[in-house]
Image: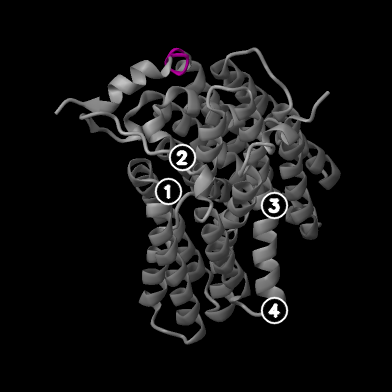
């Protein structure tokens, strides 16, 4: 039996853009935690560190889809170079503002400018789609990208914190900035795999978020993103309550590994079930596997329950991005994928806030009720949206344009 992952990398240029894309996306995980690590050490105020990181994260969540919309219209190379350059220079300004103790407002100003960082996961998926559109290999490629995203969050956060603590406060964010500059330059230089710009005739094109499938998938993944943050916050709180705070990082790593393993397996399969049904099944499994988290009373039990709760995360992402590819017109694919990534980021921010409040108010164990509620909400959205998610892209294409 042939290895499906080997097959997708036989296409010319795929190894190059996948490797460059992995390096360029490391800042997604490294930059926010790098800002917190840096400013908490240099300024001694966690509220300031969190506020600057939140300013960057939330601004990027809303700026990235607009950048991707322009990418769909003008092409990757024309947009990625200037936006990445602005982001790199802004990060450099933030590093200098921290090192030289510039006024507090400069921290926020540079963080806001750095937030024009493009959504590299969307750019990479757009290239895979250009190569394998309408072919079963695309599912394997999306599975690979979901696994790559998992590795970024596993390795990126740990690397950023480790460098900032072991070397000097700015080390994590500095490394993130270098990865962004080098990875994005290598990615843009590979013009052979760049998606073609597709113009939607003479009509005025509406944003991808106006499409019902994009709205439904993005809304569902807001709650899936909340699961990530809830698992981290509640795990940290519960391991501390159980007297083993040092076990938190290991348990969180186990959570990602569950998703990593199942994602690799799913990418090798060729399932017959429709994508909207696959997403429904994946989210049903997500909900069922969060329930044991309410019963754990020891660190080993927590690790086992966390591993179980992560098994359906990658399948959820794989099918969600597959639905976007199938239901969204090609001329707005990058924007559509970016909105889904934005939903995940917003969910993580909201999940961290809500689960933190629940933990502080009702105790660490009850933080996992936020996981159950989030999984239930995501499943309900997909259940109610089955008809819309099952429609072909023809209806979406009609909804995309407004006749001049």
In the rendered view, would you say 62 is above or below 126? Answer: below
Label 2 packing within 10 angstroms: few (<14), some (14-19), many (20+): many
The magenta-colored residue range is 387-391
Label 1, on which residue?
Answer: 76
Q: Secondary structure at mark 4?
A: loop
- Residue 388 magenta: yes
Question: For this view, does 7 lie left or right of residue 370?
Answer: right
Q: Tag 3 or tag 4, which sits nearer the N-term?
A: 3
In the rendered view, would you say 254 is above or below 177? Answer: above
Label 3, on which residue?
Answer: 154
Taking depth in this image into account, of 333 and 35 the one nearest to the observer is 333
Single out the mark in the foreground, 2 or 3. 2
Taking depth in this image into account, of 158 and 378 the one nearest to the observer is 158
Label 4, on which residue?
Answer: 167
Q: CA distance from mark 2 to mark 1?
A: 8 Å
Which residue does the image show at 47% across and 68% down from the upper left?
88
Q: CA distance from mark 2 to mark 3?
A: 29 Å
Q: Tag 3 or tag 2, which sits nearer the N-term?
A: 3
Coordinates of residue 269 in the picture (x, y in percent): 72, 22
Q: Secondary structure at mark 1?
A: helix
Taking depth in this image into account, of 2 and 334 the one nearest to the observer is 2
Which residue does the image show at 67% across and 38% down from the upper left?
144
Of the 4 image quadrants, the one containing the C terminus is: top left
Q: CA distance from mark 3 to mark 1?
A: 27 Å
Label 2, on which residue?
Answer: 195
Q: Tag 1 or tag 3, which sits nearer the N-term?
A: 1
Single out the mark in the foreground, 3 or 1. 1
Which colour scheme appears in the figure? one colour
Q: Secondary structure at mark 2?
A: loop
Which residue does the image show at 75% across and 54% down from the upper left?
248
């Amino acid at each position: 039996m042939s290895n499906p992952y080997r097959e997708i990398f036989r296409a010319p240029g795929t190894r190059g853009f996948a490797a460059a894309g992995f390096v360029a996306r490391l800042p997604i995980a490294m930059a926010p935690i790098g800002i917190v690590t840096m400013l908490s050490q240099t300024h001694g105020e966690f509220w300031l560190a969190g506020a600057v990181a939140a300013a960057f994260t939330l601004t990027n969540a809303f700026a990235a889809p607009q950048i991707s919309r322009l990418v769909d219209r003008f092409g990757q190379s024309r947009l990625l170079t200037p936006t990445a350059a602005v982001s790199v220079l802004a990060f450099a300004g933030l590093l200098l503002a921290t090192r030289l103790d510039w006024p507090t407002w400069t921290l926020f100003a540079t963080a806001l400018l750095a937030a024009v960082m493009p959504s590299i996961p969307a750019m990479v998926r757009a290239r895979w789609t250009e190569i394998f559109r309408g072919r079963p290999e695309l599912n394997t490629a999306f599975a690979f990208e979901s696994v790559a995203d998992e590795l970024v969050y596993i390795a990126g956060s740990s690397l950023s914190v480790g460098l900032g603590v072991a070397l000097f406060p700015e080390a994590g964010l500095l490394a993130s900035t270098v990865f962004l500059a080098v990875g994005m330059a290598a990615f843009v230089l590979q013009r052979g795999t760049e998606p073609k710009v597709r113009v939607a005739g003479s009509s005025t094109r509406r944003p991808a978020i106006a499409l019902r499938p994009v709205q439904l998938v993005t809304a569902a993944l807001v709650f899936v993103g909340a699961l990530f943050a809830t698992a981290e916050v509640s795990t940290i709180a519960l391991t501390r309550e159980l007297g083993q705070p040092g076990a938190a990082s290991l348990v969180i790593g186990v959570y990602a590994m569950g998703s990593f393993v199942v994602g690799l397996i799913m990418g090798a399969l060729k399932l017959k079930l429709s994508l909207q049904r696959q997403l429904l099944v994946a989210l049903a499994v997500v909900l069922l596997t969060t329930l044991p988290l309410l019963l754990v009373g020891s660190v080993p039990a927590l690790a086992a329950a966390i591993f179980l709760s992560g098994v359906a995360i990658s399948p959820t992402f794989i099918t969600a991005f597959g639905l976007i590819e199938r239901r969204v017109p090609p001329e707005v694919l990058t924007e559509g994928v970016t909105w889904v990534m934005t939903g995940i980021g917003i969910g993580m921010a909201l999940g961290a806030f809500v689960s933190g409040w629940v933990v502080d108010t009702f105790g660490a164990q009850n933080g996992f009720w936020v996981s159950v509620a989030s999984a239930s909400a995501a499943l309900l959205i997909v259940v109610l949206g089955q008809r819309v998610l099952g429609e072909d892209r023809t209806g979406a294409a009609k909804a995309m344009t407004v006749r001049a």
